[in-house]
Amino acid sequence: GLFGVPELSCPEGFQEAQDKALQESEQLVQKACSIPPGPETVMIFDQLSDSLCRVADLADFVKIAHPDFAFREAAEEACRSIGTVVEKLNTDVELCQSLRRLLADEIAMSSLDPETRRVAELFMFDFEISGIHLDEEKRKKAVNLNVRILDLCNEFLTGTHLPNKVDKHVLPEHIRYNFTAEGNYLQVAGLHADCPDDLVREAAYKIFLYPNAEQLGRLEELLTSRNNLAQLVGYDTFAHRALQGTMAKDPETVRQFLEKLSDQLSKRTQKDFEMMTKMKMKLNPQNSKLMPWDHPYYSGVLRAERYNIDPGLYCPFFSLGACMEGLNSLFSQLLGISLYAEQTQRGEVWSEDVRKLAVVHETEGLLGYIYCDFFQRPDKPHQDCHFTVRGGRLKENGEYQLPVVVLMLSLPHSTRGAPTLLSPGMMENLFHEMGHAMHSMLGRTRYQHVTGTRCATDFAEVPSILMEYFANDYRVVNQFARHYKTGQPLPKNMVSRLCESKKVCAAADMQLQVFYAALDQIYHGKHPLQKSTTEILKETQEKVYGLPYVPNTAWQLRFSHLVGYGAKYYSYLMSRAVASMVWKQCFAQDPFDRAMGERYRREMLAHGGGKEPILMVQGMLQKSPSVEDFVDALVSDLDQDFETFIMDS
């Protein structure tokens, strides 16, 4: 069966696994309600969470990645029915009372260790955001709002990807071939950001971002429903609710962080825009005003012109085998961990090119498993991501339930003449996703509810972004980057050029991220919104980003992150700031420092989400960082490296 789960040897097995989990959860609910308050209460809640998550998490992955439609459909159904049960349990008054009795019992609470206390509070928080403390009528309203929000999220997400159609005669004949023809219509399915023809990018931008009334209605209803739910359960805004328990803690801190970062970036961003404008003037003298569809293209042109970093020059040095050896060597030196390929059983994997790795510590033994689903195949989603399939936890019999994760990438297959070769971007993504996997393996918590990457959103990206710093360090790359034919190492100046090229227009790129994060905060801030979502977009774009808003476009209707990262889009920037500080302070001097690796494991990875995120950061940096520290860390990363600059000159 899939992942070694015997029931899942066929799609129908999902029903069986789901029935088993629901039966188990009913018994656990009864048990939780009948025992006196104490540590066992938390243990039972965690078992309850585990029995449901073991099916739901696995199904979450299968529903998007399995090549067989019947499996995908069965998994989708399992997700839906378990989701409904979770919603019901979150509003089960009797179940909540059993936890409340524990939290109110001072003697019982004082006997709990900090991790158990935090897990108890996190479970209580789940009840409260579902409106458990309300009277029955309001509770029903909260459940209905939750269900409606889930549906709106799915509908909005689908709408963000749908192509727009336009009558082909609207476009000049010489650019029509760039778009898919359908009778008299042309389909525009994206922004064509890399196309060298300014007119194609302009047309794609104006057509793809043309507002769709239905999608606009969905977004407005989603934002209103989220706000209503947050207010119903006692928060000022949805952002206040979403930021509880995060590193930032509240919307005010996020606002300060984004404003200060924007101030620090503004001069550099202006400079970047001036460079792009000059380049546009050179290539297109008739029309040199810089527009939003120009930014990604001209920053790429500047990068290529200043540093010759054609991916084709780098790929031969980054065979998949060499990159995996590099990761193995790095983990072994830093953390005493090795990756071993393991034989899979029949039916355990969903595609024959999936590889299973055992993660083994030199003294502690087997820590868990990583399934590597690395290669392209038809119908496979193109995103690179990490999935928790089973969370780690201490079982009742004293054994540790080993974590199981999947890393999904979209790498090209090997050919007869060459192994799978990665571009520098793919190599960095591999390191990034492996950062998540190590967090899952080493976040060996007692409770599954806070295992590995089950932590605050603005902390979850720290271990993965930190790995990008290792991937961009010559001392690390030099250990594994070898030409697959000649065995020659990647020259140092090529690595330096690659790193410096990433700083070209990096301020403008970061400013764009600040704009997205600011927009997300306003949408999830005080309601009713002062203006329409499009007017807010226009105002925020001109104030925060600096390139003009284009009339009759509505970029927010393509902003898919509003679904999974509602009020938390800033997380990526804040995680990067923390990763940058950890790198500079702890690893920049020696990226293989074992003592630092152990400190990193002890302070940041080992707790999963079982400790407050800012306390983990303090433990690692041995000081409490301020908003200004975060901003300085991000801005100092933009500075050119003087040595490389001289070498290249």
Image: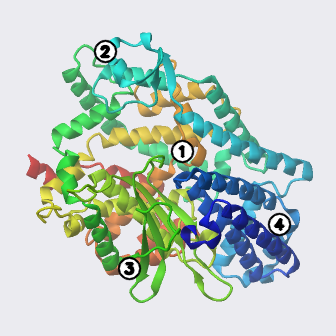
Amino acid type at mark 4 = Cys
Marks 2 and 1, Cα distance to the nearest angstrom? Answer: 46 Å
Q: Are marks 3 and 2 in contact (CB under 8 Å)?
A: no
The residue at the point 22 percent across, 36 percent down is: 302
Residue matched to label 4: 96
Q: Is residue 636 left or right of residue 343?
A: left
Marks 1 and 4, Cα distance to the nearest angstrom? Answer: 34 Å
Marks 4 and 2, Cα distance to the nearest angstrom? Answer: 65 Å
The residue at the point 72 percent across, 61 percent down is: 15
Foreground pick, 35 / 231: 35
Foreground pick, 380 / 166: 380
Q: Quadrant of residue 174?
A: top left
Looking at the image, residue 558 lies above or below residue 61: above
Looking at the image, residue 641 lies above or below residue 153: below
Q: Please state which of the two labelled residues, at mark 2 or mark 1, is closer to the viewer.
A: 2
Amino acid type at mark 1 = Arg
Q: Are marks 4 and 3 in contact (CB under 8 Å)?
A: no
Q: Which mark is residue 174?
A: 2
Q: Crowding near pointer 2: few (<14 within 10 Å), some, many (20+)?
A: few
Instruction: Farthest residue to the right: give it.
Output: 136
Residue matched to label 1: 255
Q: Which mark is residue 337?
A: 3
Marks 3 and 2, Cα distance to the nearest angstrom? Answer: 57 Å
Q: Please state which of the two labelled residues, at mark 4 or mark 3, is closer to the viewer.
A: 3
Q: Is residue 639 left or right of residue 547?
A: left
Q: Earlier in the sequence, mark 4 or mark 2?
A: 4
Q: Is residue 179 left or right of residue 324?
A: right
The residue at the point 32 percent across, 73 percent down is: 328
Amino acid type at mark 3 = Ile
Q: Secondary structure at mark 3?
A: strand
Q: Earlier in the sequence, mark 4 or mark 3?
A: 4
